[in-house]
Image: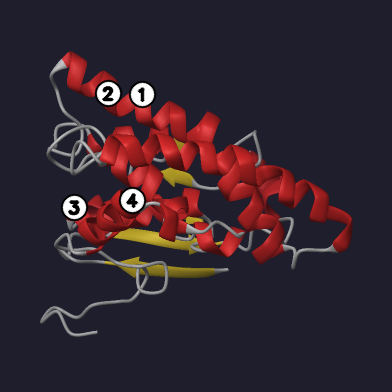
């Protein structure tokens, strides 16, 4: 286990603690939002393949035995990645206050968990985390039609608006960026989706953006890596 304090504002007391595996899109999305918001956070690294999430100490934090988990400064725990995003984004431009605009964000987050993640994330998990064993090849290939259907839905929206919920980025984009930007690792050909490719660039050029490889890099007070 490794603890990294990602302290941009040098306000350690206000820093939430995140238990996660940065290779997981569901975990990365939490780190990405915190980086984009410029918020300090502590990262407790867990290997999703190690079995740690089935241990009693972890189950006391999340009885569902999954990453990520957010620990708040008062000791409370929150799990499910999109619930964590909504909590962290409350009161910021990342989560609109107007009811319909907020519902549009939730619409895309529900889409991510039910129509996108089960196909794109699972195919990537089989390929990257499990090494695409022959015993799971049929399941891996079976995930592609559903994944491409989800990508087509995103493509149609992003051909109309620069971000999924409208003209400005929201946590809807964070939710779907996490696994979409690594969809090729699960065998998906993103060259078929020019609007998605343009959106990926827009996200990656937002101030404060950090990739999976750099999301946990420490920064000094002078902003030096």
| Quarter of the figure that contains the N terminus | bottom right
- Residue 98 shows in this picture: yes
> Tag 4's secondary structure?
helix
Marks 3, 2: nearer the viewer:
2
The residue that label 2 is drawn on is 104
Residue 158 at what x, y percent from top left? 27, 41
Residue beneath disc 3? 37
Question: Who's the residue at 18% across and 38% down the image?
Answer: 161
Mark nearer the N terminus (3 vs 4): 3
Name the one closer to the observer, 131 or 142. Answer: 142
Q: Which residue is mark 4?
A: 196
Q: Residue 107 got which mark?
A: 1
Res 118 seen here: no
Judged from the image, the secondary structure of the residue bearing numbered disc 1 is helix
Q: Height in image: 39 above or below 164?
A: below
In the displayed structure image, the side of residue 215 where residue 68 appears, left or right: right
Task: Please provide percent x and percent y for residue 145.
Answer: 62, 41
- Mark 1–mark 4 distance (CA, rounded to whole Å): 18 Å
Q: Label 3: how many residues lie within 10 Å, few (<14), some (14-19) or many (20+)? A: some
Nearer the camera: disc 1 or disc 4: 4
Q: CA distance from mark 1 to mark 2?
A: 5 Å
Quadrant holding the C terminus: bottom left
Tell me if label 1 and label 2 are in contact, CB under 8 Å: yes
């Amino acid at each position: 286990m490794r603890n990294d304090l990602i302290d941009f504002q040098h306000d350690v007391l206000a820093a939430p603690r995140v238990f996660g595996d940065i290779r997981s899109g569901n975990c990365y999305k939490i780190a990405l939002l915190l980086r984009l918001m410029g918020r300090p956070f502590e990262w407790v690294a867990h290997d999703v393949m190690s079995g740690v999430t089935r241990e009693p100490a972890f189950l006391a934090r999340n009885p569902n035995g999954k990453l990520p988990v957010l620990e708040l400064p008062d000791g409370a725990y929150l799990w499910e990645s999109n619930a964590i995003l909504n909590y962290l984004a409350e009161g910021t431009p990342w989560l609109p206050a107007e009811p319909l605009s907020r519902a549009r964000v939730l619409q895309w987050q529900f889409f991510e968990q039910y129509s996108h993640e089960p196909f794109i994330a699972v195919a990537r998990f089989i390929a990257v985390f499990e090494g695409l064993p022959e015993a799971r090849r049929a399941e891996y290939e079976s995930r592609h039609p559903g994944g491409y259907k989800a990508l087509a839905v995103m493509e149609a929206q992003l051909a109309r608006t620069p971000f999924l919920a409208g003209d400005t980025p929201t946590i809807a984009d964070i939710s779907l960026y996490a696994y979409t930007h690594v969809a090729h690792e699960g065998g998906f050909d993103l060259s078929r989706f020019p609007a998605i490719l343009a959106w990926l660039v827009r996200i990656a050029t937002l101030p404060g953006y950090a990739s999976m490889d750099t999301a946990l890099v420490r920064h000094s007070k002078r902003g030096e890596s």
